[in-house]
Image (spheres, rainbow, N blue to C red):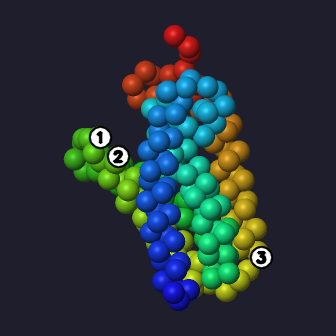
Amino acid sequence: MNDRKKVIIAEIISAVAIILIGSLFHFLYEWTECTFIGLFSPVNESQWEHIKIMFYPVIIVSIIEYFFIKHDVNNFVFAKAISVIVFIVTTYLIIFLYELIFNDNPMALHFISFFVGAFAGQLVSYFLLRCTRKSKCKNMIGFYIFLFLFIAITLFTFRPIKTDFFRDSTTGYYGIPPKS
């Protein structure tokens, strides 16, 4: 199998795996109410907390994917960091634009936007993996993007900003909800 085809297949499989893992992660905290699980699973129904179901599955899948395609690609860390950003932006852009135009927020929209976002992120990843020259600088930028997102996600789980983006849409709480 040629390198190009191998990378395309890896990105498609990765997109599907990211969607499946992200879907599972959506419910982990609700099922366990474990604070540690809340570091990588949404602790409430805020828009902010749902970034976790995009960010952490990409990291998990990328670590596995790396071992299969590391000799066939360039700038792996950079490509995956940009793919996370594309995933997040695409997902929320679809939701926000739909809400703006139709003044509605159906649950199916969230599933569709998550699916489209995952594939958009992996598509961008594919082009960056195959179409750029190897660069330590780009990979360092990718590392710092991941580090920044990790710190922000962790910090705002425990100390959310009091804005609508961080507010649980069902309870009105911010961050980890009080135990019942």
The answer to whether residue 6 of the structure is visible from this angle is yes
Per the image, the residue denoted by label 3 is 136
Q: Residue at x 46, y 62 (%)?
A: 15
Quickly name the residue at label 2. Answer: 110
Three-letter amino acid code of the residue under disc 2: His
Q: Amino acid at mark 1?
A: Met
Contact check, label 3 and label 1, Cβ < 8 Å? no
* In the depicted structure, whether residue 145 falls above or below residue 178: below
What distance separates the C-alpha of mark 2 from that of mark 3? Answer: 36 Å
* Residue 64 x/y as whole percent: 62, 62
x, y percent for residue 135: 73, 80
Instruction: Name which residue type carries label 3.
Output: Lys
Question: How many other residues sit within 10 Å of disc 1, few (<14), some (14-19) or many (≥20)?
Answer: few
| Residue for badge 1 | 107
Circles 2 and 3, Cβ within 8 Å, touching? The answer is no
Disc 1 to disc 2: CB gap under 8 Å: yes
Mark 3 neighbour density, 10 Å: few (under 14) some (14–19) many (20 or more):
few
Mark 2: secondary structure: helix
Q: Crowding near pointer 2: few (<14 within 10 Å), some, many (20+)?
A: some
Asked which secondary structure carries label 3, the reply is helix
**Nearest the eye: 41 or 150:** 41
Where residue 91 sits: x, y (%)? 42, 54
